[in-house]
Structures are given as structure tokens and as C-alpha cells.
Image (spheres, rainbow, N blue to C red):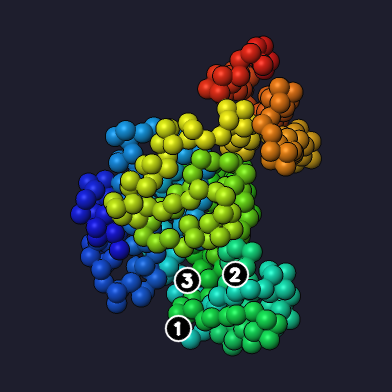
Amino acid sequence: MAAKLCAHSAAAREAFSEAGRALGIDIEKCCDDLDRLTATEYAQPAILTCSVAAYRALVAELARDLAVDVVIAAGHSLGEVSALTAAGGLTLGDAVTIVRERGRLMQIASPPGHGLMAAVFGIPAASADEICRAVDAPSERVVVANYNSSTQLTISGHAAAVRRACAALDAAGAVTQELPISIAAHSPLMTSAAEGFARALAGCELVRPRWPLVSNLTGRTYRSDQDLRAALVDQLTHPVRWLETMRAIDECDVDCVVEVGPKTVLRDLLKAELPARKCLSFGAMADIDAVRWALSAERFATGEPKRLAFLHGCLRIAVTTRNRMIEIDRYDKVVVGPYRELDDIRAQCRASGEPPSDAHIRKAVELTRRILKGKRLPEEERVRRIGKLVADNHMEPLVPDLQP
């Protein structure tokens, strides 16, 4: 993993050096040692380092001729820690240290032959949930571990219970396949691992990420640092809600989604679930031209009309602005309600095939202002963000008097 990336990128090599210093091992050699990678305490920091190295290499390459804004980030299971690290929430040294401990604890909690995971295709999630509940028992657990898409999920638990669930799922018309892994991730078998990981995480400094991060646990962006710390622990025993995560990304209406790291699994899931969304992957320098083209300003300048781009910008600001409203009931009224109205305008325009009208634009500004005010963004910052969006899309004639 990442050999070609390191051969061509100083930023990637520095990431591996930084991770190696923290772990006291040559992590680059570890990535080429299949025997060592079978131990999850080495595989997890190796995969994380590859992902962060790829992200740093991508940023370094794009910085030469493009200004790219990250709007939102997410990662699947371990990948959420990688995304947090890329966003500056954790140092790379702390990240590889805690995920090595995460892997060690998971292996202890589910020794070889004890646990099992299986992929399930072609059955609704509700049906899979029902079958798992019917097979599940206090002494032999089986649960849905990953909701990966509308047609693919993963189950996890005690080996015997997983095999019984697979037989029942096959009988119900699904296709199942055991995975070559003995760790029953994202299941109750990981309770002791979660307790140990909480102690390891308590020793790390978490800072606010530079951009919003979607939680595996909820499929929504984190509201606070406390939620982030708790959810990283809870995800060990709870399912990864990747389908909801993809939908959260789609709601932001980003120009392009890029999977960063050595594989293309998440890119392919998103392409299958949201075929209209542009999605690429970057795991080697050979991928850079496709990503640069997709992200270039010239590529999108000939795309959507300015009015539709403005509406998407309002939705993006609404989703990505940090929330400071702690009263849940009031949050639903002053943030969720206006957001739904804003999204309804987008839905109307899509259904009609017409760009937003003057009235739509003015209403979108009003709703965005209400959402930012509801999230308790300071007045000066509210005016600045909406004003920049208005100016960037040349909408000044429609909203000449921006109100805070």
C-alpha cells in the first residue's frame, strides 16, 4: 500500500515518517508485510497512515494551481479517525497510536474463531434487521454492523449466530458471503474494546476539525467535541450508518466527492447509490489529473446556472455552519424548519426543470439568514457569509439590502 504514492510525493513520505516516529516502527515497511498486516493492531495504523498520506499528497498537488475548499468529510469505521486527522482534529502521531490500541483491543475482544462478519446483498435493511433479531440470543449475538447502501450491508457477531443468520437470509432471497475476518466489529462483542478505547482516547487532545465531519453513529455532522469523542467510542459497538452518511454528503451539494486512500470501495458505493453525484478516488499520483479536472473552476463554470449554484450554496452554508443552539426543541423550530423550506425550493426547481425565480432567491436568502441566526452564528459573520455567496453568484440586484 502507498508505495507508488511515497515514491512521488514528499508530503506522503513525511506522513509515513511522522507515523513511524510515533509508533516506533517503520510503518512503510509494515505496509509491505502481509504477515504483519494480518494483525489488526498493525493493519489499522497502516491503513490510517495511507489515507492521511494520500490526503496530504492530494492537497500538495492541487495547491500548485487550484484553490479547493473542503466542505464536509466522512470516513467508514476506522476511516472516520482518518477523516478527523485530515481535518486537524487529531495529530497523526496521536491518531496512529490510538488506532493501534483500538486494533489490539478489538483482537482481544474477538479472538480467532470467536467472531465473524458476513456481507449481505439484495435484501432491505429492515428485513435483515428482523432476521438478525430472530436469530440473536444473549449467549450468541448477531447484529447488522454496516448499512453500506440500500442493497448491501454487513452482519457481525458470534460465528455460530452469524452463520445461522446467513442461512436465514439466504432463505429469504438474500446473497451472503462470509468475510475473511474473525473480529466481530460494530457489535456487542466489542464492549470491552470500547471501554479500553475510551481510556486511550481520553489521553489524546481533540481539537475542533477545520470542517464538518459526519458521524458513523448518526449519519449527521457532529454538534460538539463531546459528541465526537463519545461517538468514536460508541461506533465500536454500534453499526456504521454509511447510507445515511452518503445522503448527508449529498445534501451539502458539493461539487465533487473524493475518496482518499488506497481503495475505491466508498467511491463505488456512492456512485451506485447516488449516480448523479460526481465521485472520484485518489490513492496514487496517477489519479491526480482526473481529480484536478473535476475540481477545476473552469470545469464547473460551464455547468449549472448561477441561480441554481446560489441555491446550492445556501444549502451548503446551512448544513456546514457550526451549531451553537443547545435547546433541541427550539433547534427544530428555528433551524430544521427553515432548512426543510429551503430544501423544498430546491426540490421544486428540480421537479420543474426551471432555475430558481427571483422570489426563490429572496426566500433562500431569508431562510439561510434564519438558519444561521438559529444556530447562533454572530451577526457580523452571518452578513459576511451570505454577502460573499451573493457576490460570488452576482445576485446583488435581487438582494441589495442584506439584513443580519
- Which residue is the site of mark 1? 112
Quadrant of the rendered image containing residue 379: top right
Front residue of 361 and 50: 361
- State the separation of the CA atoms marked 1 and 3: 11 Å
- State the separation of the CA atoms marked 3 and 2: 21 Å
Amino acid type, callout 2: Leu
Is disc 1 placed on a helix, strand or loop?
A: loop
Label 2 crowd bin: few (<14), some (14–19), many (20+), radius 10 Å: many
Is disc 3 placed on a helix, strand or loop?
A: helix
Quadrant of the rendered image containing residue 139: bottom right
Front residue of 260 and 133: 260
Say whether marks 2 and 1 touch (CB < 8 Å). no
- Which residue is the site of mark 3? 106
Q: Is residue 114 left or right of residue 323?
A: left
Residue 153 badge: 2
Looking at the picture, how far across and down is residue 368, in whole percent? 68, 28
Front residue of 284 and 201: 284
Vertical placement of 241 versus 360: above or below? below
Looking at the picture, how far across and down is residue 47, in whole percent? 37, 61
Of badges 3 and 2, the one in the foreground is 2
The structure residue drawn at horizontal position 74% and vertical position 23%, both measured from the top left corner, is: 359
Q: Is residue 211 visible?
A: no
The structure residue drawn at horizontal position 39% and vertical position 71%, both measured from the top left corner, is: 40
Residue 295 badge: none
Amino acid type, callout 3: Met
Looking at the picture, how far across and down is residue 298, in whole percent? 42, 32
